[in-house]
């Protein structure tokens, strides 16, 4: 491949030798490359990916789970991560030096993770230390950049997942008087509220204004929520719930805790992606469900469980735009480059950042 083709592919415009193929031809070629590379290749696929990509995944799961599985496949030289940038970073942190983590499309990011960059975080931390002294421990959702994970690790904190957030927030509040929860305010608020923290004891840090938003005495603050959110889950609303209640009175509503507090409160159940998948899987035939999470996953659950009536909580919801960047042509392009011994879009996290991030991950793993 020439330099121009490489640059245009990295920018999202694929070379003609890929785009001229039919879908069937691309699928056949991916299968052939997988056969040739064998155990040298491992393809993890996040739950929110398109079916055209998921069909070739060697493992399907949440971001941290996939990074851990990738690290266990030590014979794999190439980890072609079908997810987003922060997931590939975590995979690189956990895998060996002999392995290369590749993101098929560098435009595949996470808007939530991008809402907290390291410069904003360091600036906020300095100001919060002035306000509260050494009374704060930072926690970050795994949906964050490697730099944020590293910052948290170096400052005595840990990562959290949507599955273990309650356990980790409880641990953190036992370590210090206050926590700074990055980057998703909704998961932080829902978790803290479930643990008995009052709304009056929560504040929001606005990185754009570099200021703390809170009514009342600052001394009573226990949880400082970073003003970030998931662009998909924030679009589920109370009106969506009212509509389902009116049109499908027997339908259960299950949502992800990245949704707004009022949506979580009015739903029947809430939990991680894994929790949602397992709940639907174990539900009796004939049961009815409205699901508040990413559309690719909802469509997959509808297809996998024809014995149940399943709809999206928001019928007008679109799939996550950045997750949707990974498609069959980009997957094939990545594999073709590996075959040509010119792998592209290699994700590499520097040792200083990696060491701090591992501290944050290890503190979580030691407690779950």
Image (cartoon, rainbow, N blue to C red):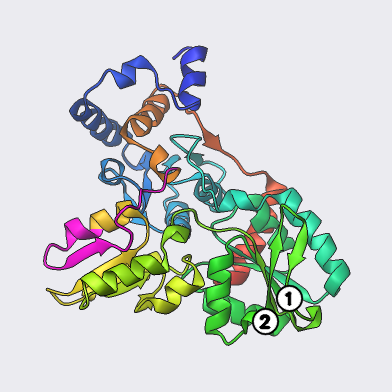
Q: Is residue 89 magenta?
A: no
Query: Does dot 2 land on a helix, a strand or a loop?
Result: helix
Q: Give the Cα separation between the discs numbered 1 and 2.
A: 7 Å
Q: Residues within 10 Å of mark 2 (few under 14, many from 20)?
A: some
Kindly tell me whether residue 236 is visible in this rendering. Answer: yes
> In the rendered view, would you say 97 is above or below 360?
above
Q: Is residue 319 magenta?
A: yes
Magenta-highlighted residues: 301-321
Q: Nearer the viewer, residue 130 or 209?
A: 209
Q: How many marks?
A: 2
Residue at figure coordinates x 31%, y 49% from the top left:
58
Q: Residues within 10 Å of mark 1 (few under 14, many from 20)?
A: few
Kindly tell me whether residue 167 is visible in this rendering. Answer: no
Is residue 28 rendered to the left or right of residue 349?
A: left
Q: Nearer the viewer, residue 25 or 318?
A: 318
Residue at figure coordinates x 31%, y 45% from the top left:
50
**Residue 268 percent location from the top left of the image:** 34, 79
Q: Main secondary structure of the magenta part?
A: loop
**Residue 358 percent location from the top left of the image:** 63, 59
Whether residues under marks 1 and 2 lie with C-beta atoms below 8 angstroms apart, the answer is: yes
Is residue 344 rendered to the left or right of residue 126?
A: left
Query: Does dot 1 land on a helix, a strand or a loop?
Result: loop
Is residue 147 rendered to the left or right of residue 323?
A: right
Mark 1 lies on residue: 215
Residue at figure coordinates x 55%, y 58% from the top left:
229
Mark 2 lies on residue: 200
Q: Mark 1 or 2, which is nearer the eye? A: 1
> In the rendered view, would you say 133 is above or below 141?
below
> In the rendered view, would you say 78 is above or below 139?
above
User: Which residue is farthest bottom?
Assistant: 196
């Amino acid at each position: 491949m020439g330099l121009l083709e490489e640059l245009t592919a990295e920018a999202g415009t694929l070379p003609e030798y890929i785009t001229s193929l039919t879908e069937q031809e691309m699928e056949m070629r991916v299968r052939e490359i997988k056969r040739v590379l064998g155990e040298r290749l491992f393809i993890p696929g996040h739950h929110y990916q398109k079916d055209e990509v998921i069909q070739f995944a060697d493992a399907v799961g949440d971001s941290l789970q996939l990074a851990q599985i990738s690290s266990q496949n030590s014979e794999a030289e190439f980890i072609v991560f079908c997810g987003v940038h922060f997931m590939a970073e975590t995979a690189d942190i956990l895998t060996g030096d002999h392995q290369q983590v590749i993101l098929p499309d560098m435009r595949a990011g996470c808007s939530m993770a991008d809402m907290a960059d390291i410069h904003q975080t360091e600036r906020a931390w300095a100001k919060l230390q002035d306000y509260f002294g050494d009374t704060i421990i930072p926690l970050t959702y795994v949906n964050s950049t490697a730099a944020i994970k590293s910052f948290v690790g170096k400052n005595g904190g840990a990562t959290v997942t949507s599955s273990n957030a309650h356990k980790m927030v409880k641990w953190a509040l036992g370590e210090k008087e206050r926590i700074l929860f990055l980057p998703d305010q909704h998961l932080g608020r829902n978790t803290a509220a479930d643990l008995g923290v009052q709304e009056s004891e929560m504040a929001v840090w606005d990185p754009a204004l570099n200021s703390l938003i809170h009514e009342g005495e600052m001394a009573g603050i226990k949880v400082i929520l970073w003003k970030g959110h998931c662009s998909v889950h924030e679009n589920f609303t109370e009106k969506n719930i009212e509509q389902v209640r009116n049109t499908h009175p027997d339908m259960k509503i299950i949502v992800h805790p990245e949704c707004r507090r009022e949506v979580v409160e009015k739903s029947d159940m809430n939990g991680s992606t894994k929790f949602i998948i397992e709940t639907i899987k174990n539900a009796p035939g004939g049961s009815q469900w409205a699901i508040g999470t990413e559309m690719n996953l909802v469509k997959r659950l509808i297809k996998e469980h024809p014995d149940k009536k399943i709809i999206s909580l928001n019928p007008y919801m679109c799939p996550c735009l950045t997750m949707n960047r990974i498609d069959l042509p980009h997957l094939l392009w990545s594999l073709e480059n590996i075959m040509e011994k010119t792998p592209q879009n290699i994700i590499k996290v520097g040792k200083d950042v990696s060491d701090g991030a591992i501290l944050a991950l290890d503190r979580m793993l030691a407690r779950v």
